């Protein structure tokens, strides 16, 4: 066996290990299990040490999205420090995860792109399947805290979508691009739907059905127009419902969608009240926000642990400056995607759209948002012929 083959297998093992640790950390609810939490935290710092050694051995220039990520981190870091957070390690933890995702893609996406995608899909699928099994064994949840059931995947049932949506988007991209892992995708869809129906997460079900609709539509042009329509709807909804908070009761179509499809009232399960309080909170520190704060900090001000809206959350965390850089990151990723579009990457883009649709009502980890943006930003590398990967394996 040649040294090149040994080196190749070692690199694959390192990639798999780091991705597996990252996915478990950002998908599983570990707060109620100190042992699991410490284990994954420790493995993450081991992963970080390995990555630093790899990066020193083969340093790469910071690309466009890397620059904006650094600037975003500096803004959030400054806000966090100046507002004296009671959770100072949160920003370090999130920063480490994002650094690992960006670094792995920067170092290996050209030669190991297909393998990186496989590792992400397998890791996310593992989390979803384990949670699916535990739902049968513990239908009331693994933990009960203050009369609230918490599950392994995401904890709260509304947070299960934070892993399920990107898992289906990335696995669907891989299925379309390489025509592989067909059985896994079918099982992933079935388990995801069953899980969300079981816990009665209506909003997440709508999100999955929306994404699956994009998947089964084969026309590139039709999906393109649906994506454009989706963006327009998203912006209008944010403006009218979240920020202006216009009374929707007179519109029978919106009333039907909210009450009969989403099974919510027109306050979106009291989210309108949270949005109003969030806007008032933002007005007190509009430029750079408050940085990362603990759940108790949010509860004291909003009576919930997040703003339940990604735009408001960004404004609370980083103010106008943080939101501006966040938007620039999205534009940078979409610009790269638009330069090298294909049918598979188009589905991944629609997966990002679905993710943001879900985040009208929820707030998901920044790590998975960045993961989808980085994949879109590297459309050219991922769209390259897979012979590059085959050549690397044969070295």
Image (spheres, rainbow, N blue to C red):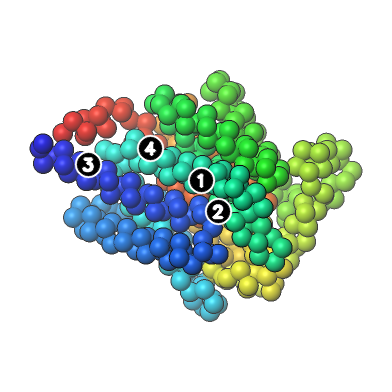
For marks 4 and 1, give the one nearer the viewer.
Answer: 1
Q: Which of the two marks, 3 or 1, is nearer to us in this view?
A: 1
- Disc 3, SS: helix
In the rendered image, which residue does mark 4 sit on? 118
Cα–Cα span, label 2 and label 3: 31 Å
Q: How many marks?
A: 4
Q: Residue 156: where, in percent of width, then height? A: 63, 55
Q: In the rendering, at what x and y percent does residue 352 appear?
A: 54, 41
The residue where tag 2 is placed is 152
SS label for mark 2: loop
Q: Which mark is residue 9?
A: 3
- Residue at (41, 24) in percent of width and height: 179
Q: Is residue 384 above or below residue 375?
A: above
Residue extending furthest front?
137
First in residue order: circle 3 vs circle 4? 3
Which residue is disc 1 drawn over? Answer: 130
């Amino acid at each position: 066996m040649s040294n090149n083959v040994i080196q190749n297998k070692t690199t694959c093992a390192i990639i798999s290990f780091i991705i597996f640790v990252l996915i478990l950390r950002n998908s599983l609810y570990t707060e109620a299990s100190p042992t699991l939490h410490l284990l994954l935290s420790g493995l993450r710092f081991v992963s970080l040490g390995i990555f630093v050694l790899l990066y020193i051995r083969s340093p790469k220039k910071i690309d466009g999205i890397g620059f904006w990520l650094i600037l975003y981190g500096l803004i959030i870091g400054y806000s966090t420090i100046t507002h004296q957070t009671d959770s100072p390690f949160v920003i370090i933890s999130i920063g480490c995860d994002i650094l690992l995702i960006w670094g792995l893609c920067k170092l290996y996406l050209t030669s190991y792109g297909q393998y990186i995608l496989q590792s992400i899909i397998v890791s996310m699928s593992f989390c979803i399947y384990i949670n699916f099994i535990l739902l049968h064994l513990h239908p009331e949840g693994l933990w009960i805290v203050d009369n609230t059931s918490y599950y392994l995947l995401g904890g709260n049932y509304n947070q299960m979508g934070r892993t399920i949506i990107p898992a289906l988007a990335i696995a669907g991209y891989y299925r379309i691009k390489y025509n592989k892992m067909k059985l896994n995708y079918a099982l992933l869809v079935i388990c995801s739907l069953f899980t969300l129906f079981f816990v009665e997460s209506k909003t997440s079900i709508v999100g999955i059905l929306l994404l699956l609709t994009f998947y089964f539509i084969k026309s590139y042009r039709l999906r393109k127009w649906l994506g454009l329509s989706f963006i327009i709807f998203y912006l209008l909804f944010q403006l009218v419902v979240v920020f202006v908070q216009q009374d929707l009761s007179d519109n029978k179509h919106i009333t039907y969608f909210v009450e009969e499809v989403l099974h919510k009232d027109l306050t979106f399960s009291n989210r309108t009240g949270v949005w109003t309080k969030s806007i008032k909170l933002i007005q007190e520190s509009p430029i750079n926000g408050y940085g990362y704060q603990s759940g108790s900090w949010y509860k004291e001000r909003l009576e919930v642990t997040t703003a339940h809206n990604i735009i408001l959350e960004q404004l609370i965390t980083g103010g106008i400056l943080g939101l501006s850089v966040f938007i620039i990151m999205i534009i940078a990723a979409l610009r790269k995607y638009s330069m090298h579009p294909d049918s598979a990457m188009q589905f991944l883009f629609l997966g990002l759209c679905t993710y943001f649709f879900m985040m009208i009502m929820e707030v998901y980890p920044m790590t998975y948002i960045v993961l989808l943006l980085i994949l879109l930003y590297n459309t050219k590398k991922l769209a390259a012929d897979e012979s590059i990967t085959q050549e690397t394996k044969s070295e």
